[in-house]
Amino acid sequence: MAQMSVHPIAASGFVASQFYDRFRPSYSKEAVSFLVGKLFNARDSQPKRILELGAGTGKFTGILKDLLHGNNVEIIASDPVLSMRQEFAKHFPDLEIKDFSAENIALPDASVHAVCAAQSFHWFANDRSLSEIHRVLVPGGKLGLVWNTRDLNSVQWVKEMHEEIVFPIYAQTNTPNQRTFEWKRVLEASDKFGPIECDETFKFEQTFSTCEEVINRTMSSSVIQAKSEVEKEVIKDRLKLLLQKHEVDQQNEIVFPYVVSMYWCERK
């Protein structure tokens, strides 16, 4: 089966993998533990395998690795973007990261007990990837999805940053984004998986000491990284003005809040 190409925004926007790795948030260990518990019983003595698609630099993988340490669970990580795999290898030299996409999973049929995707499923939510995920899962195996989504209800400047600056860029470029829920419509329309369950009770926070760090966090979004240098400078200026308007530049500790959005469903 021929491998589908990586989305052009992802291909160009994720080249700056070190920048991505430095400023993107990690994941709540409690939330990851909750999601794993929905996928399988990690304490079961039976050996298990979990496949992580779109593992990137390993933000989610590291939490998963620590959580499953000592259990009889093998983690298989994969990402089709070379720069991401290179950064991943620096963090996890003892864990190989595979070079394949969700549309062409280089694993045997019914070979994994769970598939997960952190901050990535919206990039490959299509019938082909769902067919491949269905193929490699054991009967009754589960698919788990997780996103750190900006909490738009607790901090006004975060809400304005998202609605006035970030989300319009996604809309203008028609770039896949978790908040459009197009990925969910594709999954619900599939006849390969059961009902989708959801939990959004877990929170996560990134703490920054300067406005520059907050701006870099926002600039790390692939849809912005894919812009020209001139366009990036315009976006940076808009972000600076927004943060100054809310006097964020006067804070010694800047909290960037997230809601941990988790979904899971079972292979039919």
Image: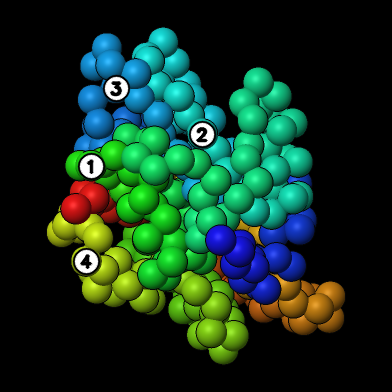
- Decide which of tag 1 and tag 2 comes sooner along the chain: 2
Q: Closest to the observer: 227 or 155?
A: 227
Sequence order check, earlier mark of 3 and 4: 3
Element class at badge 2:
strand
Marker disc for residue 139: 1
**Secondary structure type for disc 4:** loop
Answer left or right for 37 relative to 146. Answer: left
Q: Earlier in the sequence, mark 1 or mark 3?
A: 3
Q: Which mark is residue 102?
A: none
- How crowded is the residue under tag 2: few (<14 C-alpha within 10 Å), some, or many (20+)? some
Q: Could you give the CA–CA distance between mark 3 and mark 2, rounded to whole angstroms? A: 15 Å
Disc 3 marks which amino acid? Ala
- Tell me what residue is drawn at x 72 percent, y 72 percent: 226
Estimate the x, y position of residue 16 in percent, counting from the top left.
77, 56
As helix, strand or loop, the secondary structure at mark 3 comes to loop
* Number of other residues with Cα within 10 Å of mark 3, as a class: few under 14, some 14 to 19, many 20 or more: some
Labels 1 and 4: the sequence-earlier one? 1
What is the number of the mark on residue 191?
Answer: 4
Depicted 196 relative to depicted 206: above or below: below
Residue at mark 2: 76
Point out residue 142 in the picture as x, y percentages from the top left corner: 27, 44
